[in-house]
Amino acid sequence: MRNIKAIFTKQLKSFFKNPSLFGTPASFLLIPFLMLMLTDAGDARAIIVSQFVLMFAGISMIGNASYIITEDRSTMNLRFMGMAGVKPWQYLIATSGVFLMVSLGVLYLFGLMAGFSGEVMINFLILCMLGIVCSILLGTTLGLSKFAPFTMIIALVLGIGPIFAVANEALANMFRFTFVQQMNIFIRQTGGTILEMPDGTVQVIEGVAAIPEGMLQIMAINVAVLLVLFIVTNLRNGLDGERLAKKRG
Amino acid sequence: MIKMENIEKTFGGQTVLSDVSFNVKKGEIFGLLGPSGAGKTTIINILTGMLKEDGGNKEVIANPHEIGIMLDIGGLYPHLNCLENLNLYAQIYGLPKNKPMEVLKTVGLEDSAKKTVSKLSRGMTQRLALARAILYSPKLLFLDEPTSALDPGTSKGVCKLLQELREQGATIFLTTHNMDEALKLCDRIALLHDGKIVEQGNPNEICERYNSIKTVPDLESVFLQLTGVEL
Ligand SMILES: Nc1ncnc2c1ncn2[C@@H]1O[C@H](COP(=O)(O)OP(=O)(O)O)[C@@H](O)[C@H]1O
Ligand SMILES: [Mg+2]
């Protein structure tokens, strides 16, 4: 508990003191805010917000999780923490705790921007927080693995892919079961829209507040798969310095 | 406490250590001397498990959590301030709340406690790295050129601090290319050249052996005699 609290405090300070960490989430929040303020977005509200939520959850949170670990490692602190007896799971809990807390705040602001309240807001937060869990697991795994330099590419594909998937069925199928696509589908369906039919009549499609059937299960599978990936990649090797600890009993 | 036997290390065809043997006894300050590029940092990396040796045996008798390491500016977060950097380890090691400030005082950084690390001078950063390494009173300390960026006055202060730590029972392994400092500070030294330890023992005795005490013991000239190169 002591270790978790110590690392949590440090990561929280790191987050707000380092522009490389708070910079992208802050801009992904600010840009749609300005867009909605300066224009009459109308129906496009949910679409605009959804794209930035995806980029926040995909790009900036995966990047942040990976960044903070890379920093912990390159400054040799990961190793020193390992020598001090910090276990990989303690490090993971403390680090993701900070990102989850920050994300909850950011997502709430996104929700307000999209005009969510009540049931939609709660469902939005539940689903997106699960998505954030996925991002953190993926970012942490990448950060601790030798694939760390490819983090941004992977994050870009996940963050932007679903946006293109709207226009392309093959892409939609590719992203179908990813956590980012679930978030995408959910936010878009909440928007509702007014369609003008060829015969001149007007059809109102109501926004849907409920999480579609099966979506939570898909999210749970995403979390499980990424958790296994994390465990396989990292518990085997441990944090830097763990090996030394083992050798000396 | 530390034993190295016939350690070899090669980096992609370049043999850096060809046959390094020495041992460090409990409670002493042991200095590893050699010019820049001799392989001093490599030896520390091997001893602390950061690098794997290619041949030979080594033994370090200490629990990982009782080891303090100061490698260049390693272990510091540039965006956090001095106190925040130390607080992380103070909390992990369960130290009293005032301990980080105390240690900052010991290295003369109490006025910079709230300064961001990236804004510190090189010498101040080095002192903070030392503070981080000694924070939890480790039994075994590895210090890589702890005084290389310090002015003579501060350097003296650090030497005094290291002697105090030894009196409290710590074993200290340090590298340096400052011969004067080694002579005054170290109980025993080893001279590293060409991947081998060319001489080791008490620094004053070594100087006597090579007849290089004229007015004061002169390790520089011993090294020159032994290797033909200057430090
Ligand atoms: N990771 C590495 N990869 C390749 N060469 C290295 C590595 N680390 C050190 N070396 C080489 O080993 C030699 C000794 O380096 P080092 O141990 O840092 O010397 P010192 O600390 O005595 O100045 C140098 O020639 C350096 O270039
Ligand atoms: Mg060196």
Image (spheres, rainbow, N blue to C red):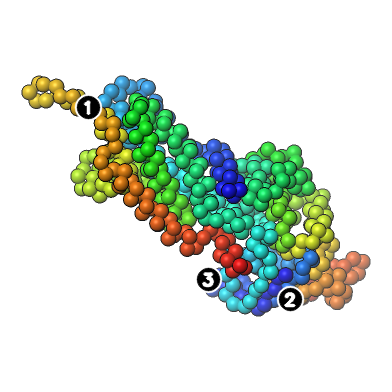
Q: Amino acid at mark 1?
A: Glu
Left/right placement of residue B129 relative to residue A54 reads right
Question: Is A223 placed above or below B208 here?
Answer: above
Task: Check if mark 3 and mark 1 are on a common chain.
Answer: no
Instruction: Identify the subunit bearing mark 3.
Output: B
Q: Amino acid at mark 3?
A: Gly
Residue position marked by numbered label 2 in the rendering: B198
Q: Residues within 10 Å of mark 1 (few under 14, many from 20)?
A: few
Is any atom of residue B152 visible in this view?
no
- Which of discs 1 and 2 lies nearer the camera? The answer is 1
Q: CA gap, disc 3 to disc 2? A: 24 Å
Q: Residue at x 82, y 62 (%)?
A: B185
**Secondary-structure class at tag 1:** loop
Q: Residues within 10 Å of mark 2 (few under 14, many from 20)?
A: some
Task: Check if mark 3 and mark 2 are on a common chain.
Answer: yes
| Label of residue A206 in the image | 1
Instruction: Identify the subunit bearing mark 2.
Output: B
Q: Amino acid at mark 2?
A: Val
Residue position marked by numbered label 3 in the rendering: B12
Query: Picture coordinates of residue A161 (x, y %)?
Result: 30, 44
Q: How many marks?
A: 3
Q: Residue at x 53, y 51 (%)?
A: A91
